[in-house]
Amino acid sequence: AQTVTQSQPEMSVQEAETVTLSCTYDTSESDYYLFWYKQPPSRQMILVIRQEAYKQQNATENRFSVNFQKAAKSFSLKISDSQLGDAAMYFCAYRSLETSGSRLTFGEGTQLTVNP
Amino acid sequence: NAGVTQTPKFQVLKTGQSMTLQCAQDMNHEYMSWYRQDPGMGLRLIHYSVGAGITDQGEVPNGYNVSRSTTEDFPLRLLSAAPSQTSVYFCASSSTQFNEKLFFGSGTQLSVL
């Protein structure tokens, strides 16, 4: 079974600065998806960015980018020019492409605070 | 387009009571699923369905029942609520089980006393 670990329960960043959230995972599979989800106080789960394991190029979405290290099984999220609206819980998630059910395996979450 | 709708948003139960959490989607998605979110544990899959009439267990299915009689609806039933089922419950859907993009509902906060 796959596991996802987020070793930083809490992080903080100054507005306009850059922060990196860490995520590691364990799998024996070669093809899969990785995701970062944002959960603001409204509780809504918002997809921030996704990475397909067979693609070597790191995914980017505006101010959000990832550092995907497949051999190291690492998938960190970098938020540039942090904004107050980025404050939320962030979850890293893994999706197998070799088992049915489209199930996601989530990490424990990192609570991000953005200081003005 | 309402997307994925969950009701109720909040619920308090007494131990032993039963209830059904409702989930409906209007996107004609084949795949629907239920997750629970507990502090420090992320979200964990309870049950899922790859189409009407087809359901299967996820990671933490004990204490929960599901059925899928229509494409639109995927209710989650607690037959005899326990304090360990206090959690936030999310319903999620995607067009098929092979589509990686999941659409989440806004969640149901359930407390069992």
Image (spheres, coloured by chain):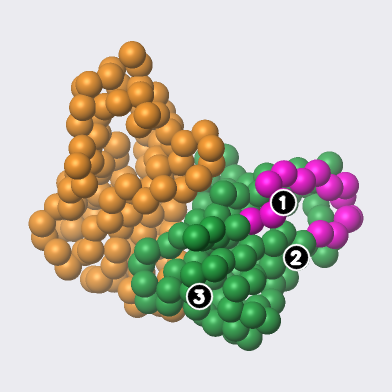
Chain colours: A orange, B green
Chain letter, disc 2 residue: B
Position of A22 with respect to A45 (left or right) is left
> Which stretch appears magenta?
B6-19
Labels 3 and 1 positioned on one and the same chain: yes
Q: Can residue B101 be seen in this view?
A: yes
Q: Which amino acid does label 2 sit on?
A: Arg
Picture coordinates of residue A38 (x, y %)? 40, 42
Q: Choose between A75 and B17: the one closer to the eye.
A: B17
Q: Is residue B57 visible?
A: no
Q: Which of marks 3 and 1 is in front?
A: 3
Q: Which amino acid does label 1 sit on?
A: Pro
Q: Which is more N-terminal, label 2 or label 1?
A: 1
Q: Choose between A73 and B95: the one closer to the eye.
A: B95
Q: Which of marks 2 and 3 is in front?
A: 3
Give the residue pinned by disc 2: B77
Give the residue pinned by disc 1: B8
The residue depicted at 37 percent of the width and 29 percent of the height is A85
Circles 3 and 1, Cβ within 8 Å, touching? The answer is no
